[in-house]
Amino acid sequence: MALDNINKTVVTEFIMLGFQAGNKIRIVMFILLLLIYCFTILMNLLAITLVSTSKNLHTPMYFFISNLSFIDILLTTVIVPKMLHVLLHQRGTIAFSDCMTQLYFFASLEASECLLLGVMSYDRYVAICNPLRYNSIMTHRCCVILVVTSCLVGFCITLNFILSTLMLNFCGPNIIDHFFCDFIPILELSCSDPHIVRMEIILSSIIVILIPLTIIIFSYIKIIITILRIPSSTGRQKAFSTCSSHLIVVSIFFWSLFGVYVLPTTEKTLSISKILSLLYTVFTPLINPIIYSLKNNDIKKVLHDRVHRNVR
């Protein structure tokens, strides 16, 4: 702690409480989350490797899946190691600068993932609703531009309200009842009025959440209408199977985000908020490659061929 010119205590570090539980429960959670983290890295690396080394998977859909896996690896790495430290020691300290850095990368990666999921729904829309022009529309150059744009927009928008957060005064208390640095608990600790920052976050959310969600809803309405017009049940089933994995991932991701940031905090306990946060920061990066692998015949075939070849 240090003193500023107006004789207020300036916060130089935060204390994160994490999950308050007995030693045995915390040890079990630590082991479980460590295993989930390791398995998440392994599964996403496997997805990236399969897509990058198999010519059969060099299509726009799998290109987006591999980039989603890369974002998920970064996202879970930003959150989990510090969370494991807090769990192991019952609480942990984090420097103010480190907290802001974690917040920036977490929010940027979440924003990039939201935008990328919107791009992936557009890809499925073109593939099912306009299949004859799919290859001419979703060229490799177009796919790269869409991914790069999603990441640049996510990181640039987040930088704007991170800089505004840095302009706020933090004079105590410095206890964050969470397992990572998130906007809501941090803004609650500010000694100055965070109204402007909250407005910036709301405006940014329109771009990184509502716009992709609108694209997703519009795309799937058109997809469902197109699928229902297919005369054969086999054709309908095949068409829907190409986008069902993405729909499951989108549902889990956005509903957990809405549960934490949109629903009134008075209607849910802090523990429920932490569990929902776990869902989109820890479990979703694990679920994504599993869902895409288990429900995707192309990836299963490539994986089966690789395993069979190695066994020989």
Image: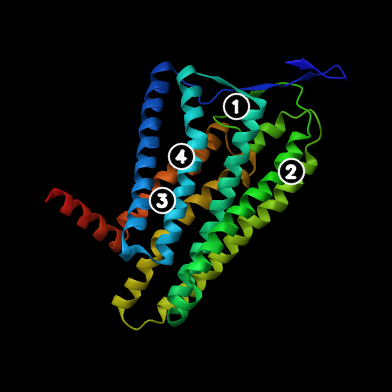
* Mark 4 Cα-neighbour bin, 10 Å: few <14, some 14–19, many ≥20: many
Q: x, y percentage for residue 138? A: 48, 72
The Cα–Cα distance between marks 4 and 3, rounded to whole angstroms, is 11 Å
* Mark 3 Cα-neighbour bin, 10 Å: few <14, some 14–19, many ≥20: many
Q: Say whether disc 2 or disc 4 marks the residue closer to the N-terminus.
A: 2
The quadrant in which residue 192 appears is top right
The Cα–Cα distance between marks 2 and 1, rounded to whole angstroms, is 20 Å
Is 284 in front, or is 98?
Answer: 98
Q: x, y percentage for residue 93? A: 59, 20
Residue located 56% across and 63% down the image: 145
What amino acid type is highlighted by mark number 2?
A: Arg
What amino acid type is highlighted by mark number 3?
A: Asn
What secondary structure is marked by label 1?
loop
Query: In the shown orientation, is residue 303 left or right of residue 103?
Result: left
Q: Residue furthest left?
A: 312
What amino acid type is highlighted by mark number 4?
A: Val
What secondary structure is marked by label 2?
helix
What secondary structure is marked by label 4?
helix
Q: x, y percentage for residue 99? A: 63, 30
Q: Say whether disc 3 or disc 1 marks the residue closer to the N-terminus.
A: 1
Colour scheme shown: rainbow
The quadrant in which residue 59 appears is bottom left
What amino acid type is highlighted by mark number 1?
A: Asp
The numbered dot on residue 198 is 2
Quarter of the image where the N terminus is located: top right
Q: x, y percentage for residue 70? A: 45, 48
